[in-house]
Amino acid sequence: MIVGRTSIAFACLAWSGCAGDPAPHPAPPPVVARPPRDAAAATKAYGAALVREAEDPRAALAELDKAIAADPEHVLARLHAAELRLSLGEELARADRDLGPALKLAPDNARAHLRAGQIAQQLGDLPRAQTFLSQATKLKPDWDEPQYELADVWLRMGRAEDAVTAGRKAVELAPDRLELTMRLVGVLEGAGRPADAAKEMEAAATRIGKSAPLFRRAAELFDAAQLHEDAVRLRKVADKIDPPPVVPKKRELPPARKR
């Protein structure tokens, strides 16, 4: 009987389906080798890009691509390459891919999130643009640029009130930047609030003091809001700053004599 039981036990051990058979250990995941890094070559190429950027941005891009190839973890090279492609309006899909690893390597870099948001917006991916830009505003709350970019995205997404809030925040952070006021005016106009847009425009014109075109633009917005008295008032201010040309009166010719 002992021999028989021993034989059954050995047979059970040999058969992988027997109860009590321990589960096999999973195979370890394959080791993925990281691309080789040549920090010295990357630094050299990055420096060359900075030197050439002003005169030849495409040559600078070629150097930045060399830097990324030499050191895939060179965050500044990836970010700078994305910025150059964004400014040139070229290869935006490649710029988007370049920024992916940069965001993973530097998740707290507000500038990288801003550029990623701008590129996503240019590519028409508004939800991604909103995500990146919102993160940029959280990482650097006192930076005006992500705020007004976010305002544009929210306006395009139909979130008019959020767009106005972001636009006002941008102006609050940099009240002396006329560009931001002009963009806020555009957001208010796009949100169907021409009267508020006119008031912002008038305030900016008053701060500057001697800009007839700004007062005339405010007058146009007051007209759009059906506030014609305000429009007339501001056109008078504009005309005092920059009087319209006087059209000379034409002399009437005497009637021709009959021969």
Image (spheres, helix red, strand yellow):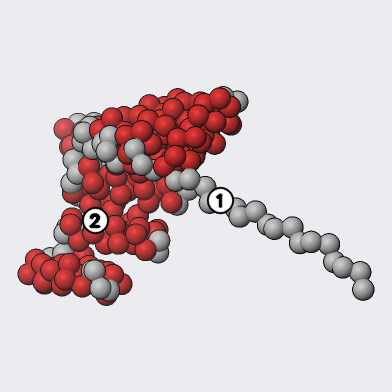
Please determine whether, in this image, residue 53 is positioned above or below residue 144: below
**Horizontal and vertical percent position of residue 231:** 53, 30
* Of the pair 118 and 223, the residue shown nearer to us: 223
Circle 2: element type = helix
Can you tell which quarter of the image residue 95 is in? Answer: bottom left
Q: Splitting the image into 4 quarters, where does residue 125 fall?
A: top left
Q: Quadrant of the N terminus?
A: top left
- The residue lying at 37 percent from left, 63 percent from top is 88
> Would you call the spot at circle 2 few (<14 residues within 10 Å), some (14-19), or many (20 or more)?
many
Q: Is residue 11 left or right of residue 253?
A: left
Q: Using a 10 Å C-alpha cutoff, classify the residue at mark 1 as few (fewer than 14 neighbours), some (14 to 19) or many (20 or more).
A: few
Q: Nearer the viewer, residue 114 or 125?
A: 114
Q: Residue at x 34, y 59 (%)?
A: 87
Q: Amino acid at mark 2?
A: Leu
Residue shown at the point (29%, 41%) measured from the top left: 177
Circle nearer the N terminus (1, 2): 2
Classify residue 206 by image quadrant: top left
Q: Which residue is mark 2?
A: 79
Q: What kind of residue is marked 1?
A: Val
Circle 1 sits on which residue?
246
Q: Which mark is residue 183?
A: none
* Mark 1 or mark 2, whichever is nearer to me: 1
Q: Nearer the viewer, residue 175 or 97?
A: 175
Q: In screen coordinates, is 95 left or right of 153? A: left
> Residue 234: x, y in percent?
48, 32
State how many labels appear: 2
The reply to whether discs 1 and 2 touch (Cβ–Cβ < 8 Å) is: no
Q: Is residue 95 left or right of residue 164?
A: left
